[in-house]
Image (cartoon, rainbow, N blue to C red):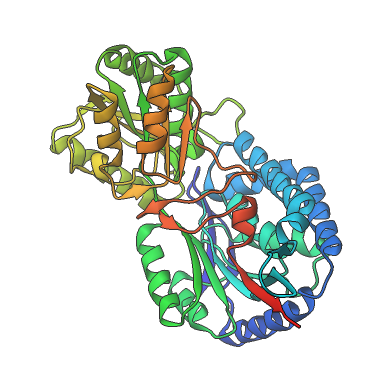
Amino acid sequence: MSIQSVNPATGQLLSKYPEIEPDAVEASLDLAVAAGLSHRTTSLDERATCLRRAADLLSARKEELGRLMTTEMGKPLAAAVAEAEKCSWVCRYYAENGAAFLADEIVETDARRSWIRFEPLGPVLAIMPWNFPFWQVFRFAAPALMAGNVGLLKHASNVPGCALEIESILAEAGFAEGVFQTLLLGAARAEALVADHRVRAVTLTGSEPAGRAVARAAGQHLKKTVLELGGSDPFIVMPGANLDAAVRTAVQARIINNGQSCIAAKRFIVHEAVADEFEGRFVAEMAQLSVGDPLEAGTDVGPLATAAIRDQLHDQVVASVEAGARLALGGRHLAGPGYFYQPTVLVDVRPGSPAGCEELFGPVAAMFRVPSAGEAIRLANDSAFGLGAAAWTNSDVEAELFIEGLEAGSVFINGIVASDPRLPFGGVKSSGYGRELSAYGIREFLNIKTVWVGG
């Protein structure tokens, strides 16, 4: 068996990598345990120094790393370069703040001394997706390694070059052998890793079915999990909103990463008083997007990552139209090589249709009209998902209604939903549980130990 890297812009094979043999997996797990025992004894200063070196390497090589990401999964080159820089940011953030997040917390009790201590768990398995092939990994790795844990990466099979490069960067940054290892293996073998007694916890970013499978396997072995799954994020627009900014941001929020982002806006819920104007301007701007070679500077939308993803997206569009939605723009894939899909807008979307209740992973927007803020909240919450939500309004009263009423891990008012090292990131409902980033993220994979000293 081999792990293959295919350029989604051309459909051409880039490289093949041998899948790791079972004996080598055993050796990697043993090495992770040994490395974990050593790494947990290193000082916080040592760990921070390594993270700063990793940040320097990511910044220095951002063009090279961006090209690697683009050729393996198809995002526009500028976005890929920015992703490398964001990874540098998260490394610096935890290098600078990790010690404070991990410091003992003194608690006054009837003991002579009592406090809360934060200790690493050991090897943590990270099962990561292809859509942000560096960021998804570093937002796990930076806090985990700073906390004294060690990482085992099972990356998506279509980005093996990225997976190996991440391991190389962290090794070059000074982390000891075994502190972070990439295991090139297929999804079918991941469950055995989850079950292995040497793996102490699991984090997964991916689809809802994948999350359920990992949670089920981890639960059988009483292992902590953090799951960041899909999303069908609402983007609400009220009459008082700045329509220029809302339309501009809406297009960006829908096509980010070629539309392949869990926190991309997918359902556009617009008050009927401004729906005609918003939809008209939104469709016009979507129609102006440049679709093509993601390595070219002027490209707005590159290919989808695989032919299967493109074909599934098209099936969802067709089924939504058959259920009553109307195509205002697009609705088909582009002829020629590569896995390209037209920017697409569906209006009059029906509840229960794929565009109304499923995650559309590509540049397809679903439009809805509502008569009030209350109905906007009801429709936004009428989803299995609860990752992010955005609302546009100039009313403080309306803003408070959205902040309180929207069922999501993140609510952004008059802005684009985004992950930020300084803020916790994660979802509710079928979008998963647990948090990444910030102080909350670094504490997910720790033994929060109570210490009580009497006498």
* For residue 409, side relative to residue 92 (left or right): left
User: Number of numbered discs present?
Assistant: 0
Q: Splitting the image into 4 quarters, where does residue 336 fall?
A: top left
Res 229 visible: yes
* For residue 389, side relative to residue 324 (left or right): right
Picture layout, residue 55 above or below residue 120: above
Picture layout, residue 226 above or below residue 124: above
* For residue 357, side relative to residue 103 (left or right): left
Q: Position of residue 266 (x, y in %)?
A: 36, 36
Q: Position of residue 12 (x, y in %)?
A: 51, 51
Q: Position of residue 192 (x, y in %)?
A: 48, 81
Q: Residue furthest left?
A: 323
Q: Nearer the viewer, residue 423 or 71?
A: 423
Picture layout, residue 405 above or below residue 44: above
Q: Nearer the viewer, residue 212 or 301?
A: 212
Which residue appears at 24% of the width and 17% of the height?
Answer: 272
Res 341 visible: no
For the C terminus, which image quadrant? Answer: bottom right
Q: Position of residue 387 (x, y in %)?
A: 42, 46
* For residue 257, side relative to residue 177 (left or right): left
Picture layout, residue 97 above or below residue 322: below
